[in-house]
Image (cartoon, rainbow, N blue to C red):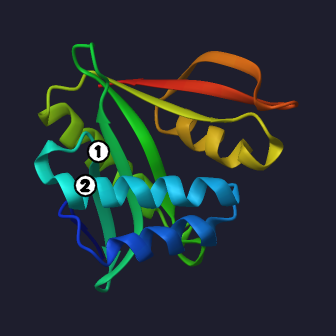
Amino acid sequence: MVTFRSEVRPEDVEIVRDIITSSGFFYDFEVPVAVELVQDRLDLGERSDYHFLFAEVDGKTVSYTCFGPIAATEGSFDLYWIATHNNYRGLGIGNQLIGETHRIIKEMGGRIVVAETSTLEKYAPTRHFYNRIGYSEEAHINDFYKEGDGKVFFIKRL
């Protein structure tokens, strides 16, 4: 049974670090960025541009999204992070989490969600996930992150 919470707690700093690290998908230098966004929300509260939704199984936080409105747009949101602890992948938790995230974004006036990911082969499951849940590939930039590692933009219209 998956439950959700949007309140960010101090312990989420280390929980997010653990989730991101366990996934094996992110570069070492990306981990502090994910943690920094949690800290921003803790420090600024409602004034933060970053919103979180955490998925819990049996009281343990195992997955999360971080999202927020895109400045100077009407109803466009970035999906900054979606990650599930490696021990809980493949159980449908990400599907439930993104569905609830979309519901919240729509409640907040969102109409478009933008997600970005790498073109590297190890991110093929991520790209497949976005396609499977109704995102469409809208743009592709070759060699964005580094030589041979491009960026793909996916869009979900709510």
Count neighbours of disc 1 (C-alpha within 10 A) and say few if under 14, some if 14 to 19, many if 20 or more.
many
Task: Tell me which amino acid carries mark 1.
Answer: Tyr
* Residue at screen point 61% across, 69% down: 21
Spatial CA span between label 2 and label 1: 6 Å
Count neighbours of disc 2 (C-alpha within 10 A) and say few if under 14, some if 14 to 19, many if 20 or more.
many
Residue 68's disc is none
* Residue at screen point 29% across, 37% down: 68
Task: Tell me which amino acid carries mark 2.
Answer: Arg
Q: Which residue is mark 2?
A: 41
Q: Nearer the viewer, residue 104 or 1?
A: 104
Q: Nearer the viewer, residue 99 or 8?
A: 8
Q: SS at mark 2?
A: helix
The percent coordinates of residue 4 (x first, y second) are 24, 65
The percent coordinates of residue 65 (x first, y second) are 38, 52
* Residue at screen point 41% across, 38% down: 79
The percent coordinates of residue 97 (x first, y second) are 35, 55
Q: Which residue is mark 1?
A: 50
